[in-house]
Image: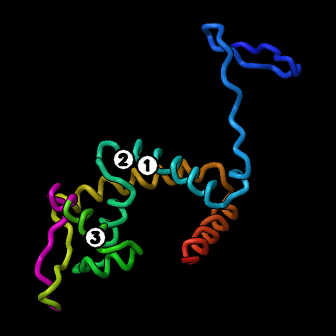
Amino acid sequence: MTQQANLSGRPRRQTRRGKRAAPPADFGLLPELVGYNLRRAQVAVFQDFADSLADCRLTPGQFGVLVLIEANPGLNQTRLSQALRVDRSTVVTVIDRLEGRGVVERAPSPDDRRSYALRLTGEGEALLARAKPLVRRHEARIAAGFESGELAALTTLLQRLAEVR
């Protein structure tokens, strides 16, 4: 792209075809808002996650569910929804998808006949074992611009922000 001055004397970008590019948008108060900046960061992080785990076909939410099930064998859907702080219907949908892929299974709970205990299948364990190093590399990549103290502070601040609700 080339630069061309506009009437104010500031450079105006031109496209390769010689057309003037639109001036950058004015974001008003958005850059001052925590929620706006948090959402922009989330989009960037989720996109990198999706790129990093494309072969695993896992979303960040699905990965989190698999990790929680692995760490809490026999967890039921109600406790899972409480741990994730999402409504139970959302968890049911995620479990349905993961069960459809053959990576999670529901079994009658030994403690409560009205609920199901969740567990990873052998295929689920293998998928999670493959995904974990990819997630660690993804985390290292998105954290690369921070010093260790900054990263610890950011994590603490995000945890505090999550408790606002």
Where's the C terminus, which quadrant? Answer: bottom right
Amino acid marked by disc 3:
Ser
- Along the line of sight, the residue nearer the viewer: 17 or 125: 17
Give the crowd class for mark 3: few <14, some 14-19, many >=20 residues within 10 Å.
few
Side of 135 where 159 appears, left or right? right
**Where residue 70 sits in the image (x, y, percent)?**
28, 71
Amino acid marked by disc 1:
Phe
Q: Residue at label 3?
A: 89
Q: Residue at x 32, y 66 (%)?
A: 65
Q: Nearer the viewer, mark 2 or mark 3?
A: 3
Q: Residue at label 2?
A: 53
**Which residue is farthest bottom?**
111
Numbered badge on residue 49: 1
Amino acid marked by disc 2:
Leu
Which mark is first along the chain, 3 or 2?
Answer: 2
Q: Is residue 6 above or below residue 46?
A: above
- Tell me which segment is drawn in magenta: 97-111
Q: Secondary structure at mark 3?
A: helix
Numbered badge on residue 60: none
Q: Is residue 79 magenta?
A: no
